[in-house]
Image (cartoon, coloured by chain):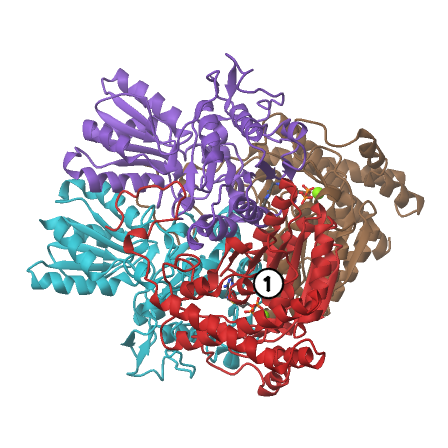
Chain colours: A purple, B red, C cyan, D brown
């Protein structure tokens, strides 16, 4: 687990002026701002008071143990509790630490968080955020390496954000906290150390608004979470070969900004999706299927998915290393759509 | 009438209201006017009402699949409950919830859950919420004997204990979980004993005696309200009918004799007798309550029947509070 | 819950001669045959001794309570226990009764059943079958109406069967019990009452072998579980209009019989997928994306998905009724690929 | 040497083997030869070996993320364990598992689990399996103090109780779960008390005394083998190092003084002193054991280092026993 990244001192919107903040720090500060903004915002999770990975460091001291609360190892219980909190006026942020731990809490997230608003005829709002880091590529093996956003995309009633930069991490997370619906926030561990200078004034990134990270005209690359910077590297490579790639980061997977993707593919006629999750029933599959359905006549080539193959993640680094999308595979896929 | 007498009268009235509501609901289900399965609280009315009357109007409550009695006990209007059972637009959940998922937030009923034990952590959260917001509300959560073996309950009880959350864990031990008797599924004789694993009180009460249930639950609620943490209350009661209407069980799993013993312990005539015996109500008043309740349920059925079904264009309403427009809704 | 279907008397391969058996009964008899065949096969689940829905009626009496065992309501615990049983020589069949209850057991199924074989370097085999009925269309509301096979398709290491007939129910389930990997069996409640005469002699349906339910040349309809008979009705309609539809039932979703699907689409050039699950990241999406990737040049129209929209299932029958794929929508989709 | 003396000697040897294995593993992790995080059993050797030596060779065991000590205690060869930590093909899991997921089926080690508490139901299943197959095997499952609050444990304990499954629930209470002290997360002082909720015995032992651990665990194992059901054994021990190597904690969460108290209770010198004091081993024999153990671990490291990494074409091996050929593996 990377830890040199950890920063604990507090930065607020007003005092981050001009500083380059890490992804981790942006998450921490987003929560800090939301805790400051609304007394009904609370945080809970294992070891959040200490702030293990750096996303909650110092918050307990500032906001007290009632609002920033360590929980026992009882994910099912406290994820369900967060629904009760959310339905009665609080806006909990639940830190599940690592994405595979969502499985223990699956019933609370699906049967309670996703369903209560609908099932009770809109009597209930469920403004809860579940955060979880996606560890992969670091020798953490099968129990700590999943990227399960697609698993949750199969569940109507949830919203899902996948920030790929410090800016998005802060802006999306702040929007998620203020959203009246349950939002899952999947944070890519491989981005923890990425730094960026954030705006001086408070800002939000709305859910459902993709970012065009690079404009291009020959091929559209939709990239998710950690794959965004890899896609940009691929685009750079392709540029050297005279191929102009447009890179789009959907930023939220539910809702998904279809118009932006459609517009781009209508222009380029070619689509590559770079998705670090495993292949079957992935976000990549959904995007490929939908774009094909909507824009078939304008496609010059089949959409190509660059994903992790359908396998559990092996511990051994030489085995693991080959699995995820990388700039080479993304560029190769883009070339394939053109040749 | 003293305040106590009024309370006892209201207790009887709500028990009777549940009784009539459930009996009529069964008829309607058999006639096809209520779709889906129906889990009733018949013969458990004393347990339900003893527990819910111990709560304040603004206290919270969560429950389970056996879900009609709880909101009635908590004071919900039966017309919108009945409309919900019929899947009507005027239903308390706009026809989206149905029998297993009643909820009436206006009386603190935060929803019943069709997934066993999954409403219990929600109750924990409502209790934490009261603490954080600095109110003195309490949350009571109903669960069955079968549910007591689910992990969610263990986790919730531990957290309630360490944080002294104002929650009352209320086990309606009706001796059976579908076809499984408690002795077969549960490692202790009294579920209340489980509280010993968390260091808070566990009490057993006679679930056919509404006053005993009320007294014990009131104590638990007061303890919670004082900030002293949770209590586990176990009410021994019994399910006489099948697990659910519309779910006949293919083979015999319990003795008629066992059922007969409990038939003699029907809480309604017993409580009526006590109230008249103690001079709290006259026979005429008991009859009058019955008459009123029947009218109330009749009116609820009329209301439900004459209500419309939700319109097809409302299908997505409430799925999200900030709606997402699906790209291709029905293709 | 339909129950007039329940049959409790025992039928074995030898005495079912010529009888038309229901889907439910085929499941029961498959288990009975496997319990007879191998003393290491065991069954567990809530109320299996009584045999609530009719899939285990009489088995406890025949095989005893050690092998056919009622469990407490502890899905996480007993689904995890089944993995321990499977790794030490037993072949458990776990009856989860209804598909949404898998959520409570999600961690056991994903972290233990799906991962142990791989994570322990093939030291472990995990021959466990998890069975669950998909209730939908019967006014059971959001907590009892999911069709979550795609949710589990996102998890490498699991196999998934979705029988659409008594024959397949028996043949696939028997294969699943003898498979050395964890298999999820999703049984469509809307098929419980469907009857079919089964072969006199013992038979198996291998996993990964689709069935061509009807041959056709204009459009391929891949249909899943309960949608198979609806697709056949649609094909019948279309036939009257001079459109020849080929209907394919994949029967298992993992492994999926790609060659059969590709061959059909190569012939017809058109694909409709009828899938009763919700749309996003569905099996339908996966099939659409993969077929497009492999056969783009041969497609005359974009693959069209006929699914349930992304919504929780409302209780009210008039609302619920409109949601699922039906012959009209399937036929309309097929026409759309041709017009 | 008497049989008892041999056992005590072996006890010491395995404790020492864990000690050296862990210390060397930490060095290798720091040098980058072992990837990922590393949760060691340092200072918990008496707990681990006292528990595992109470098992028969063919008994089963499951464990958790703190996973190296358990298989060593159960008798696994350290060379293949070390190779696994390095991600090598010769590793006990062919390099697929790594530090948190050791398993050695040849000695009954059915696997450690990186997901808290999720190995406990697996142990229940192994116990049920022994019952069904009519063997007299027992399964012991290790879990931590933090894990004791997870629902999976509640469900498993209840089922073990009702079916008298031959399982020993063994809690390594090292006082902390990452940065959370037990008093903050857990509603009872002794986790052993939780057994009262299931009606089976719960015992507390000094986890720094391997003989006390062994004796209590042996009793639990024998009880299980006799068909009398589970026992919960809680060993009080302590984690002196950080939660994991490679996971520095950003802020201070416990007092040095607390750690110091436990430093004085290091089980290895204490046990060596006792063995020599009681005349079971001479000082020379103790030194000789140390020398042998170091050689064994050195050899293991050599073996691991000289082994190859798994080949890329083996990536899918073991994902399925009956393999599925993925359509497009790496596109
Ligand atoms: C997680 C889950 N497992 C199983 C079921 C199916 N089920 C519905 S009610 C019930 C029995 C519940 O027994 P108990 O808790 O005693 O409540 P009772 O019905 O007796 O009131 C079962 C097993 C379910 N709804 N949810
Ligand atoms: C379900 C789950 N939640 C959280 C974690 C992260 N985690 C790993 S170890 C640990 C603490 C475990 O404490 P304890 O059970 O006392 O074991 P110890 O590490 O002290 O040996 C936590 C929270 C996890 N691995 N799995
Ligand atoms: Mg019950
Ligand atoms: Mg610990």
Q: Is residue A182 left or right of residue B215?
A: left
Near-viewer residue (A114 or C318): C318
Q: Say which quadrant the C terminus of chain A sits in.
A: top left
User: Dividing the image into four equal quarters, which quarter contains ligand 2?
Assistant: top right
Residue C288 placement, left or right of B318: left
Whether ligand 1 has any atom under 8 Å from the Cβ at mark 1 is answered as yes
Residue in the foreground of this view, choosing between B202 and D193: B202
Image point (76%, 32%), residue name: D254
Q: Secondary structure at mark 1?
A: strand
Task: Give whichever of D76, C292 is nearer the camera.
Answer: C292
Image location (x, y in percent) of residue A296: 17, 39
Residue found at the far left of this picture: C242
Question: In screen coordinates, is A81 left or right of D256?
Answer: left
Residue situated in front as seen by the camera: D119 or A185: A185
Quarter-of-image position of residue B15? bottom right
User: Does A20 appear above or below C28?
Assistant: above
Label 1 chain ID? B
Q: Which residue is mark 1?
A: B143
Residue B274 appears at what percent x and percent y?
Answer: 69, 79
Quarter-of-image position of residue C194: bottom left
User: Which quarter of the rendered picture does the N terminus of chain A lie within?
Assistant: top right
């Amino acid at each position: 687990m990377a830890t040199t990244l950890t920063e604990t001192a507090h930065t607020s919107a007003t005092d981050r002026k001009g500083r380059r903040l890490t992804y981790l720090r942006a998450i921490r500060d987003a929560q800090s701002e939301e805790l400051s903004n609304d007394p009904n915002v609370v945080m809970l999770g294992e070891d959040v008071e200490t702030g293990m990975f750096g996303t909650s460091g110092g918050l307990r001291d500032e906001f007290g143990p009632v609002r920033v609360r360590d929980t026992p190892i009882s994910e099912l219980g406290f994820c369900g509790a967060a629904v009760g909190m959310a339905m009665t006026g609080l806006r909990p942020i639940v830190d599940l630490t690592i994405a595979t731990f969502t499985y223990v809490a699956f019933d609370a997230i699906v049967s309670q968080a996703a369903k209560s608003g609908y099932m009770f005829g809109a009597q209930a709002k469920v403004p809860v955020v579940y955060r979880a880091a996606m560890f992969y590529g670091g020798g953490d093996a099968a129990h700590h390496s999943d990227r399960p956003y697609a698993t949750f995309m199969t569940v109507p009633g949830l919203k899902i954000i996948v920030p790929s930069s410090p800016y998005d991490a802060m802006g999306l997370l702040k929007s998620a906290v203020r959203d009246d619906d349950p939002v899952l926030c999947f944070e890519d561990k491989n981005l923890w150390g990425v730094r960026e200078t954030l705006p001086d004034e408070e800002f939000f990134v709305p859910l459902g608004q993709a970012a065009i990270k690079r404009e291009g005209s020959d091929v559209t690359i939709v990239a998710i979470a950690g794959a965004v910077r890899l896609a940009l590297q691929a685009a750079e490579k392709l540029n050297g070969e005279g191929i102009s790639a447009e890179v789009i980061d959907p930023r939220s997977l539910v809702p998904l900004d279809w118009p932006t993707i459609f517009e781009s593919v209508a222009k380029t006629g070619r689509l590559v999706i770079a998705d670090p999750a495993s292949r079957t029933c992935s976000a990549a599959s959904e995007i490929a299927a939908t774009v094909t359905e909507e824009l078939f006549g304008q496609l010059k080539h089949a959409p190509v998915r660059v994903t992790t193959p359908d396998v559990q993640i092996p511990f051994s680094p030489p085995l693991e290393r080959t699995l995820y999308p990388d700039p080479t595979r993304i560029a190769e896929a883009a070339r394939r759509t053109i040749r | 009438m003293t305040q106590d007498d009024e309370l006892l009268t209201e207790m009887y009235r709500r028990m009777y209201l549940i009784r009539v509501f459930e009996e009529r609901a069964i008829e309607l289900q058999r006639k096809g006017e209520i779709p889906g399965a129906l889990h009733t609280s018949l013969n458990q009315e004393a347990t339900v009402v003893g527990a819910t009357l111990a709560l304040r109007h603004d206290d919270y409550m969560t429950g389970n699949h056996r879900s009609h009695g709880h909101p009635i006990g908590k004071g919900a209007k039966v017309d919108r409950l009945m409309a919900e059972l019929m899947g009507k637009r005027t239903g308390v959940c706009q026809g989206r919830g149905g029998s297993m998922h009643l909820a009436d937030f206006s009386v603190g009923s935060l929803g019943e859950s069709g997934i066993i034990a999954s409403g219990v952590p929600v109750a924990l959260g409502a209790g934490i919420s009261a603490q954080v917001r600095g109110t003195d509300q309490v949350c009571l959560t109903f669960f069955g004997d079968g549910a007591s073996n689910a992990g969610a309950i263990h986790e919730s009880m531990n957290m309630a204990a360490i944080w002294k959350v104002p929650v009352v864990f209320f086990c309606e031990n009706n001796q059976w979980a579908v076809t499984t008797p408690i002795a077969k599924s549960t490692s202790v004789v009294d579920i209340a004993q489980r509280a010993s694993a968390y260091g808070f009180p566990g009490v057993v009460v006679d679930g056919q005696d509404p006053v005993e249930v009320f007294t014990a639950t009131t104590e638990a609620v007061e303890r919670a309200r004082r900030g002293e943490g949770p209590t586990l209350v176990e009410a021994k009661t019994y399910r006489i009918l099948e697990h659910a209407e519309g779910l006949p069980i293919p083979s015999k799993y319990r003795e008629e004799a066992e059922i007969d013993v409990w038939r003699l312990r029907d809480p309604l005539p017993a409580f009526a007798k006590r109230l008249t015996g103690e001079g709290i109500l006259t026979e005429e008043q008991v009859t009058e309550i019955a008459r009123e309740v029947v009218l109330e349920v009749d009116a609820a059925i009329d209301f439900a029947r004459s209500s419309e079904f939700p319109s097809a264009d409302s299908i997505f309403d409430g799925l999200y509070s900030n709606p997402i427009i699906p790209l291709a809704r029905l293709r």
